[in-house]
């Protein structure tokens, strides 16, 4: 796994890092849902009807899952940990809008225990991208943020994968350029050549498009 080390500017990251903000928001919502489901479980048990006990079991399972997400998310949303654990990946701007830009990234969605990598194109719409020109084709070095949305891992691929720009963790243009240079030209060219696929990725339910390993160039291929 290709990692990229740099000193994270926490003040800057807290102000612009949208993934950290999203994960903290998710944690708060999950805790709220766990409380409501817990209250619902108690009320159904209090009703003391056979059908109520069946619903209570479902509510209780939902409460446990929501509580797990609520407690697990804050640990995952540490800015330093996300950058330290994430793999350095290429992303390019595929579209620009008045409200932000769309990033198209190349990410290995296979889990560590998988026998082979499984590359996919993923997209993410971002509101702010300091340190970069907001134009199609702009190279945006990022780290992959991979998560599962359930307590137990299922399958050999991550359920949720996103790209977090290095620029969300530093104001230093030299750091961004160093990260850009650490990614091979083959990967950058692969993304640039497939910018037209961004719309197809956006329309997919998982917001990602698996690539045929036999059609990938160089060391990325089968």
Image (spheres, rainbow, N blue to C red):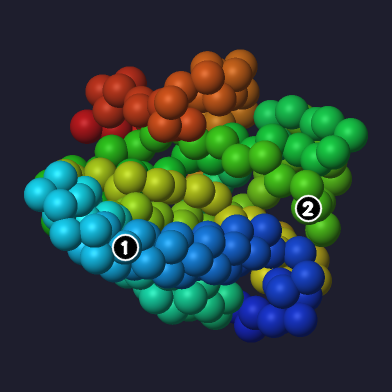
Q: Nearer the viewer, residue 1 or 79?
A: 79
Q: Residue at x 29, y 67 (%)?
A: 42
What residue did someone put label 2 on? Answer: 129
Q: Is residue 209 left or right of residue 95?
A: left
For the residue labelled by badge 2, is the local secondary structure a helix, a strand or a loop?
loop
Q: Is residue 139 left or right of residue 135?
A: left
> Percent from the top left, x then y, of residue 178?
65, 64
Which mark identifies residue 43?
Answer: 1
> Percent from the top left, x then y, of residue 220?
33, 38
Task: Give the quarter of the figure containing the N terminus.
Answer: bottom left
Task: Give the quarter of the figure containing the C terminus.
Answer: top left
Q: How many numbered callouts?
A: 2
Q: Nearer the viewer, residue 188 or 99?
A: 99
Q: From where the camera sits, is residue 176 visible?
A: no
Which mark identifies residue 151?
Answer: none
For the residue labelled by badge 1, is the local secondary structure a helix, a strand or a loop?
helix
Give the mark nearest the N terminus, 1 or 2: 1
Q: How far is disc 1 from disc 2 in space, using C-alphas? A: 47 Å
Where is 33 relative to 186, above or below?
below
Where is 136 relative to 86, above or below?
above
Q: Residue at x 20, y 51 (%)?
A: 52
> Percent from the top left, x then y, of residue 76?
44, 72
Q: Tell me if mark 1 has few (under 14), some (14-19) or many (20+) residues whose alpha carbon lies within 10 angstroms of its own.
A: few
Q: Nearer the viewer, residue 180 or 39?
A: 39
Which of label 1 and label 2 is nearer to you?
1
Q: Residue at x 33, y 45 (%)?
A: 159
Q: From where the camera sits, is residue 95 visible?
A: yes
Q: Tell me if mark 2 has few (under 14), some (14-19) or many (20+) residues whose alpha carbon lies within 10 angstroms of its own.
A: some
Q: Residue furthest right?
A: 98
Q: Nearer the viewer, residue 171 or 30?
A: 30
Q: Is residue 155 left or right of residue 166?
A: left
């Amino acid at each position: 796994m290709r990692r990229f080390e740099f000193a994270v500017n926490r003040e800057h990251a807290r102000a612009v890092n949208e993934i950290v903000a999203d994960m903290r928001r998710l944690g708060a919502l999950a805790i709220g849902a766990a409380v409501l489901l817990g209250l619902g479980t108690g009320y159904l048990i209090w009703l003391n009807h056979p059908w109520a006990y069946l619903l209570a079991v479902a509510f209780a399972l939902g409460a446990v899952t929501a509580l797990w997400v609520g407690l697990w998310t804050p640990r995952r949303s540490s800015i330093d940990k996300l950058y330290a654990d994430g793999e350095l990946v290429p992303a390019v701007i595929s579209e620009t809008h008045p409200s932000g830009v769309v990033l198209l990234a190349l990410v290995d969605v296979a889990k560590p225990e998988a026998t082979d990598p499984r590359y996919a194109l993923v997209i993410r719409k971002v509101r702010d991208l300091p340190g970069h020109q907001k134009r199609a084709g702009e190279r945006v070095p990022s780290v992959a943020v991979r998560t599962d949305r359930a307590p137990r891992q299922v399958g050999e691929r991550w359920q949720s994968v996103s790209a977090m720009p290095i620029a969300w963790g530093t104001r230093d243009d030299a750091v961004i350029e160093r990260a850009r240079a650490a990614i091979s030209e083959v990967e950058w060219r692969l993304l640039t050549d497939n910018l037209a696929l961004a719309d197809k990725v956006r329309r997919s339910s998982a917001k990602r498009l698996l690539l045929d390993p036999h059609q990938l160039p160089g060391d990325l291929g089968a």
